[in-house]
Amino acid sequence: MDVVEFGPLTDPIRAELEGDEEDPFDAAGSTLQWRPKERHVALRGDDGHLIASAGLVLTEVQVGDGQPLPVVGIGGVLVSQAHRGQGLGRRVIMEVLTRAAILGPELALLFCHRNRAGLYERHDFVEVPPPVLVEQPKGRVEIPQVTMWRALRPGAELPAGRLVVLSLPF
């Protein structure tokens, strides 16, 4: 298995990862607009096909009345349906965290469904108490997904206070 990196997710790459799965992110019914990831880390199987990926973006958050803080946003974590249950989610998350740590910000942030939070907790992500606000075309809204953060450097901490993500969610 090889680790590969690439920029934005193109339609052919998305199709390779998602296959014919209708809703791999359980996003049906969601009205939120999501920010495309600028970079991706993926796992390529022995047959040459992509079997897992995770995306990264650089963005800023504001906590309480504090100054904006840079963070690495992680999103679009996906293991193709035929390869789930083999530990590839853990592996692609470790790979994306390795890349996130060299991008500069001290913190990583992600959004996930409640039933997937345990996967991220095993990688030292901690839930951010709601409400968390995110940008949308018509203004800020509370995100219904679980928001989680993790230090990318020893001793880094997310300050206490209400979190506002200063971009579309990722």
Image (cartoon, grey):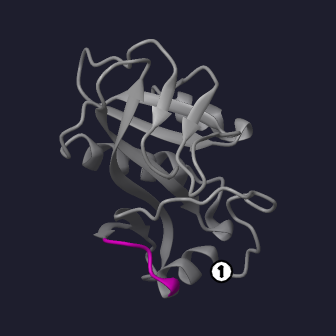
Tell which residue pokes out farthest to the right in this image: 29
Q: Report which residue position mark 1 lands on.
A: 19
Q: Is residue 101 magenta?
A: no
Tell which residue pokes out farthest to the front in this image: 138
Q: Quadrant of residue 84?
A: bottom right
In this orientation, which residue lies closer to the viewer: 129 or 55?
129
In this image, 155 relative to 20: left or right? left
| Residue 129, position as x, y percentages in the image | 60, 20
The residue depicted at 42 percent of the width and 42 percent of the height is 166
From where the camera sits, is residue 123 visible? no
Q: What residue type is labelled 1?
A: Gly
What residue span does the magenta drawing correspond to?
Answer: 7-11
Tell which residue pokes out farthest to the bottom in this image: 12
From where the camera sits, is residue 77 visible? yes
Placement of 27 over or under 142, stated as above or below: below
Mark 1 crowd level (few <14, some 14–19, many ≥20, 10 Å Cα): some
State how many labels appear.
1
In this orientation, which residue lies closer to the viewer: 71 or 43?
71
| Residue 97, position as x, y percentages in the image | 34, 43
Q: Under tag 1, what secondary structure? A: loop
Magenta part mainly helix, strand or loop? loop
Q: Quadrant of residue 106?
A: top left
Q: Quadrant of the N terminus?
A: bottom left
In this orientation, which residue lies closer to the viewer: 2 or 6?
6
Placement of 113 over or under 4, stated as above or below: above
Placement of 161 over or under 40, stated as above or below: above
| Residue 160, position as x, y percentages in the image | 44, 12
The residue depicted at 65 percent of the width and 80 percent of the height is 19
